[in-house]
Image (spheres, rainbow, N blue to C red):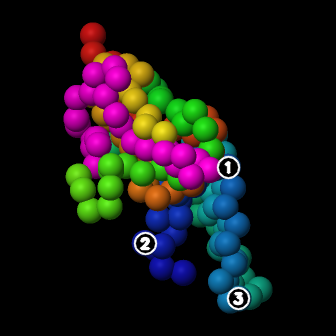
Amino acid sequence: METKKIADLAKILKQNKLTKLDLTEGDVRLVLEAAGGKAVLQETTGDAEIFMEETTLTMEENTVAQETVSAYEQKSPLVGTVYLAPQAGSAPYIKVGDKVKKGDPICIVESMKMFNTIEAEKDGEVVSVPVDNGQIVEYGQVLVCIREEA
């Protein structure tokens, strides 16, 4: 399996706060498991098993983790499909680096054919938008992380 594909899967594991990802493609089985800050990779091809362990985070990953901790996580108030722009082809409501004020629209969540405008709950700077346009979101899933202004 390609290294880039494995890295992308590890990123999905981390972004969605999953603890284990088990994937089989043909005769190759890939198991990614997050355990206390370590990412453990087990790849099985036929009879051979390959184990790799990553024990250190890069500087960029450490910075992202610190920003997430100090940012306010605005969560979805309902289950539905999230739309990051008011209509197809238009600019998104927000993007990373934008300043928002309490009450500014940040996205729309469609649920049961009802379009619900979700507004910012805090003033601050958008540090991440962990959802994709058109993605189905769960109740309580993080829609946007806002670093509050001091």
For label 2, the SS is: helix
Residue 147 as seen in the image, left or right of residue 31? left
Number of dots carrying numbers: 3
Q: Position of residue 87 (x, y in %)?
A: 32, 55
Q: Which mark is residue 40?
A: none
Residue 89 falls left or right of residue 1: left
Magenta-colored stretch includes residue 95: yes
Q: Reading the chain from its start, which is encountered first: label 1 or label 3?
A: 1
Residue found at x 62% / y 50%: 112
Give the image location of residue 61, x and y in percent. Answer: 39, 44
Is residue 116 magenta-colored?
no
* Spatial separation of the CA atoms under disc 3 and disc 2: 19 Å
Q: Which residue position is annotated with label 2?
A: 4
Residue 107: image x %, image y %? 39, 42
Q: Name the foreground residue: 89 vs 140.
A: 89
| Residue designated by label 1 | 19
Is residue 89 something one can see in this rendering?
Answer: yes
Q: Which residues are magenta?
A: 92-115
Q: Is residue 52 above or below residue 131?
A: below
The amino acid at mark 2 is Lys
Q: Residues within 10 Å of mark 2 (few under 14, many from 20)?
A: few
Q: Which residue type carries mark 1?
A: Thr
**Which quadrant: the C terminus?**
top left
Lower position in the chain sequence, tag 3 or tag 2: 2
Mark 1 or mark 2: name the one nearer the start of the chain: 2
Looking at the rendered structure, the secondary structure element under dot 3 is loop
Are the residues tagged 1 and 3 within 8 Å (C-beta)? no
**Residue at 42% of width from left, 22% of height from top?**
121
Residue type at the position of mark 3: Asp
Residue 27 is labelled as 3
